[in-house]
Amino acid sequence: MIRTRQLAYQYPGGPALRFDDIDVPQGGVLLLRGASGSGKSTWLALAAGLLTPTAGDITVAGQSLTALGKVAGDAWRAKTIGFLPQKLHLSSALTVHANLAIAQWAAGQAQDDVRIREALTALGVDELAARKPAQLSGGQAQRVALARAVLLQPKVILADEPTASLDDEAATQAVALLQATAMRYGATLVIATHDARVAANLDDQIGFQPLFLGRQ
Ligand code: ADP
Ligand code: MG
């Protein structure tokens, strides 16, 4: 679940961003919409505990993030948040398998090859495990990044502009894949996008809500 109350963030020397309150139940889908610069990536960083609100509160999976310190925040994020960044940040020198293994290592866990295989299989990229990122298509690389995001079975999946630079068919697939993956893991899904194709492709039957930014 995600709950915000009078959430606000002020960049030093930057804009003051204020966000409408939302309540997303566990397993629900939140679509963050708004023009470029309206604060979508900032909202995701607040939900991931990467930024601390300058006012208001945000509670994610039962944890208020307002007073979470750096060290506690890092541990909390590793076990709670699966992040699919706009730029995928796969390590080019490492195989697909090793890219997932270092995610376990970074979270302080022992390498678990069974779980890595499970995540890659769930995203349909198991046969690409020995490849390097340069040997993947854009869609394949995104599936690998999503496998990495769900590897630690997060309660919340945050996706930043997941359809940027995808053609219509790939964009449709990416949205369906995100939603199916969140459902498979019982995770709450947040998609931040300025792309109207995402709303058109989301199955809004299930706990769906939109939040439009930049309209105050
Ligand atoms: P979006 O993801 O919707 O495009 P962002 O959250 O990236 O929007 O940015 C929201 C606003 O905050 C923009 O005006 C942007 O210029 C500003 N901003 C983002 N990051 C910083 C930063 N590190 N320092 C100052 N201003 C920033
Ligand atoms: Mg952004």
Image (cartoon, grey):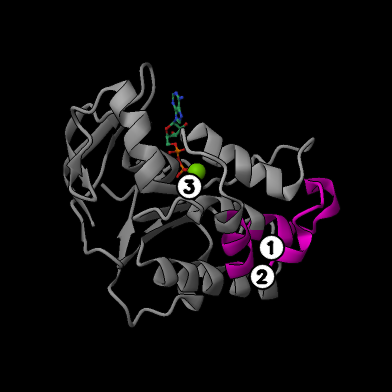
Mark 3 residue element: strand
Q: Which mark is residue 166?
A: 1
- Labels 2 and 3: the sequence-earlier one: 3
Query: How far across and down, in percent of the image, does residue 55 sit?
Result: 17, 30
Which picture quadrant has residue 27? bottom left
Q: Front-most of 68 and 53? A: 68
User: In the displayed structure, does residue 110 sit left or right of residue 59?
Assistant: right
Query: How far across and down, in percent of the image, does residue 105 sit?
Result: 54, 35
Q: Which residue is at a point 65% across and 55% down the rendered structure image?
A: 144
Q: Amino acid at mark 1?
A: Leu
Residue 149 seen in render: yes
From the image, which quarter does the N terminus lie in? bottom left
Q: Amino acid at mark 3?
A: Phe
- Labels 3 and 1: the sequence-earlier one: 3
The residue that label 3 is drawn on is: 83
> How far is the residue under mark 3 from the one under mark 1?
19 Å
Q: Which residue is at a point 37% across and 38% down the rendered structure image?
A: 77
**Magenta residue check for 131:** yes
**Residue bounds of the magenta highlight:** 116-143
Q: Is residue 79 above or below residue 180?
A: above
